[in-house]
Amino acid sequence: MPQYFSRSANTFARMTILALVSGLGLVCWAGFLIVRSPYEMMQNVPREQPVPFSHEHHVGGLGIDCRYCHTSVEKSAFANIPATKVCMNCHSQMWATSPMLEPVRESYRTGRSIEWTRVHDLPEFVYFNHAIHVHHGIGCSTCHGRVDKMPLTWQAQPLTMEWCLNCHWHPEQYVRPLDQVFSMTYTPPPNQLQLGAKLVKQYHIQSLTSCSTCHR
Amino acid sequence: MKTHSICVLVVVACAITIGCRHDMQDQPKYKPLGQNRFWADGRDSRPIPAGTIAVDELNADDPTHTGQANGAFLDTIPLPVNMSLLERGRDRFDIFCSPCHGWLGDGNGMVARRGLRAPANLMDQRSRELPPGYVYQVISNGYGAMGDYADQIQDVRDRWAIVAYIKALQLSRGAPLSDVPDDQRAELTGSSTMGGRQ
């Protein structure tokens, strides 16, 4: 009986299996990278909104504090989008006839909500509490970036689980003094690690990393 | 054995690729400010029926909540005025009042400078003579072009803290140097560091 396959076919068969296995691994790995990529997370993409609200103008230009509008951030898990009335505190007089602000005035007249596009949209199997973070020295800009430089708001950080855990493992790298939490211009001092370690102790920050901390 | 492990790998790969459904990501539950097609107004949050009063929170006759007693505005602050109340007041004043009334309460805030109809100068004689209960009532109900801040400053203690801080500002802005304790005078004459963030 003639030999159909040369001796090298053995190697070829082994290589094929190896290529198949590693190819599948590669595909899985690529998929893993893609789902966590800035593209998939829509990081750094300014979102279209019904009214082109500019944090750059209101925060950077006018110096309005975050909490003027996001009033519940210190009390609640959820940092609210302000009611239309809060816009109208000023815009009943300023830019009161601007076509750009017509959706705001319409919402105020009719009582219907302005349908803003959510920029920071965590998966709903994740629990996040704003109040506990701002009361323990995690600044707005640590997660939301320099909002005072955003003409339209975008997501500055990846919001992946790895990103959350990075801070939960090493809070001393990010924690800042409580009176600087709402500052947009705060930059960590050169001795951040020493200061951070001190603040972690002072604010009783626990490094909570068990599953049920966030998946409850 | 090889077939077996390849099968496992294929199943895992399929699970990863078809696992991209968002059922858990976007759960059909009510969320703060969420959208909801079930209700006519499209909101998850349901409006509180008119006239609803939380347990023990009627407060219709409570001077701390109305700023009035026996039909007259309170001429005192119905909370213990101490340093922590003033600090809280400064904090809240800087957030909610300073955009229009200015860091110093002189009506020269950033929004006012951009064209808002002149907000009150809280440091003028008229404002100095206003009873605390009246200032509280303006914060709670608004006045003229100023909208009410009842929703933004929900805790009445915070409103009183702001009133106390405004009164302290008025005192400090009109005080002669001789009123300053001896050991702190040098601080004022040496440099002009005003309170508040700039």
Image (cartoon, rainbow, N blue to C red):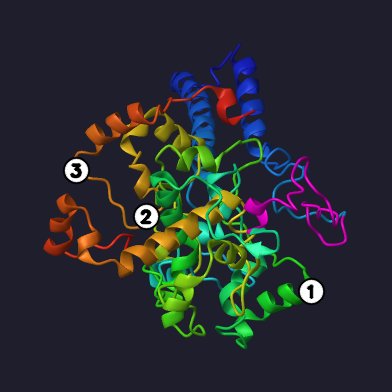
In the picture of the structure, the residue carrying the numbered disc 1 is A110
- Which mark is on residue B150? none
Q: Residues within 10 Å of mark 3 (few under 14, many from 20)?
A: few
- Kindly check if marks 1 and 3 are in contact, taking CB atoms under 8 A apart as contact: no
Name the image quarter holding the N terminus of chain A.
top right
Q: Position of residue A41 (x, y in %)?
A: 53, 49
Q: Amino acid at mark 2?
A: Ser
Q: Position of residue A172 (x, y in %)?
A: 32, 33
| Element class at badge 2 | loop
Quick check: can you spot residue A51? Answer: no
Camera-side residue: A96 or B56? B56
State whether discs 1 and 2 lie on one chain: yes
The magenta region covers: B39-67
How many labels, in total?
A: 3
In the picture of the structure, the residue carrying the numbered disc 3 is A190
The residue that appears at 63% across and 86% down in the rendered structure is A99
